[in-house]
Amino acid sequence: MTEVISSVEAVDVRFPTSLELDGSDAMNPEPDYSAAYVTIRTSGGGKGHGLAFTVGRGNDVEVAAVRALAPLVVGLPVEEVLGDLHAFSRRLTGDSQLRWLGPEKGAIHMAAAAIVNAVWDLYGRRTGKPVWRLLSEMSPEQLVDLVDFRYLEDALTRDEALDILLRAEPGRAERTAHLLEHGYPAYTTTPGWLGYDDDKLVRLSKEAVADGFSQIKLKVGADRDADVRRLRLARQAVGPDIRIAVDANQAWGVQQAIDWMRSLVPYGPYWIEEPTSPDDVLGHAAVRKALAPVKVATGEHTHNQVMFKQFLQAGALDVLQMDASRTAGVTENVAILLLAAKFGVPVCPHAGGVGLCEMVQHLAMFDYVAVSGTTEDRVIEYVDHLHEHFTDPVRIRNGHYLAPTAPGISAEMRPASVAAHRHPDGAVWQGEAGA
């Protein structure tokens, strides 16, 4: 009997991080880190997990978006889905009616990401491999078959993508061994939340250096004088050799970003992240030109591979920050990694949140092994929140992500955590958090 996808389940899971102002920034002062948590089940007893990350209100909208896509998935033969993941992704992102809500952006696209990632998790479990390794052991031809080149060919052709992968193929085994032994470089945003007081900022910055991180990140954008003071204190705490990135979370207009950042330049910011609207390609290019050599980083709110293409074509970013659940999951992110490689731009994935560190590490590690072949100027964001709720949480040693070895994409949450944090009826929300 043919094994089929029998169900797509979505649960509204929220964590009350606003109580301690964890995750606070200029645009999200009191976030509750949340997940539209997806479980795919098959008629043969298989399962896969994925999620779309939000910051509280609206997570119910994301759950509804997953449920709207579920009829496109339930009943499909598992082998057919896993045998053509490009077609499966297009099925979700190209539905003739749901596509009108995007196209390829917003809640529907993020819901597609949650489902696509859950299918990759299922694939990893089925093969007994973590997703980074599953991808890294695919042939260059199999990898380019994942990519939708329809809107990319003016910037990246299939032949160019194949050439990138073929050039990287000879060193895969050595890079896999290096990754398993040493891990992948990380940076931490843990010290830098905007709601933390100066003492906590200084203490956590010093702890980050002691833990082996060579880069930290501070949130900025609410109060210029406070930003100058906080960056000065962080620089004093970590010394001259540690990179300090800053992140405005879209708080500024273009000229405001340039003027504000010039106040921070004396303290050596490495990059400014999301200095203005995430859709403003030319605005980012103007900020980059005005502030060089301070780098411009963006990507966590970039809707899709076409937007990344335009940022790269316009020379509007120095650092590409892909996200595991903003674009349509693993499949679309393969295309984005290939675009970054074509343009020679380093990828430093956005993480933090809930479950993003767990998922995005697989993409960065695949990039190192099979696409770019390097970790130079590349770091994965790390935030020390909520990992205890996952069955295969990230592991950090000496400022590096250790490579996952368990099958899948590391997105499975503990059942007790899901039950306690289910909104609005979980025990956590029936207690202090709900009040």
Image (cartoon, rainbow, N blue to C red):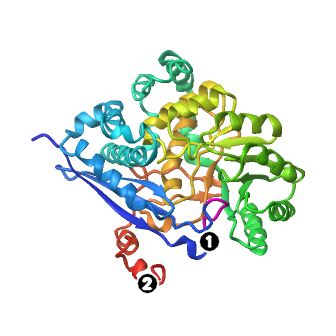
Residue type indicated by callout 1: Leu
Residue type indicated by callout 2: Gly
Residue 396 percent location from the top left of the image: 59, 58
Residue 69 percent location from the top left of the image: 29, 46
User: 345 or 135, which is in the foreground?
Assistant: 345
Structural distance between the alpha carbons of marks 2 and 1: 18 Å
User: 201 or 407, which is in the foreground?
Assistant: 201
Q: Residue at x 36, y 72 (%)?
A: 416
Extreme right residue here? 266
Q: Which residue is mark 1?
A: 21
Local crowd size for mark 2, using a 10 Å CA cut-off: few (<14), some (14–19), many (≥20): few
Residue stretch rendered in magenta on the structure? 21-27
Q: Residue at x 48, y 58 (%)?
A: 54
| Mark closer to the chain start, 2 or 1 | 1
User: 137 or 72, which is in the foreground?
Assistant: 72
Residue 265 percent location from the top left of the image: 86, 49
Q: Quick one: SS at disc 1?
A: loop
Establish if 20 lies above or below 208.
Answer: below
Disc 2 and disc 1 in contact, CB within 8 angstroms: no
Q: Quick one: SS at disc 2?
A: loop
Q: Residue at x 75, y 69 (%)?
A: 201
Locate the N terminus by quadrant: top left
Res 431 label = 2
Establish if 232 lies above or below 113.
Answer: below
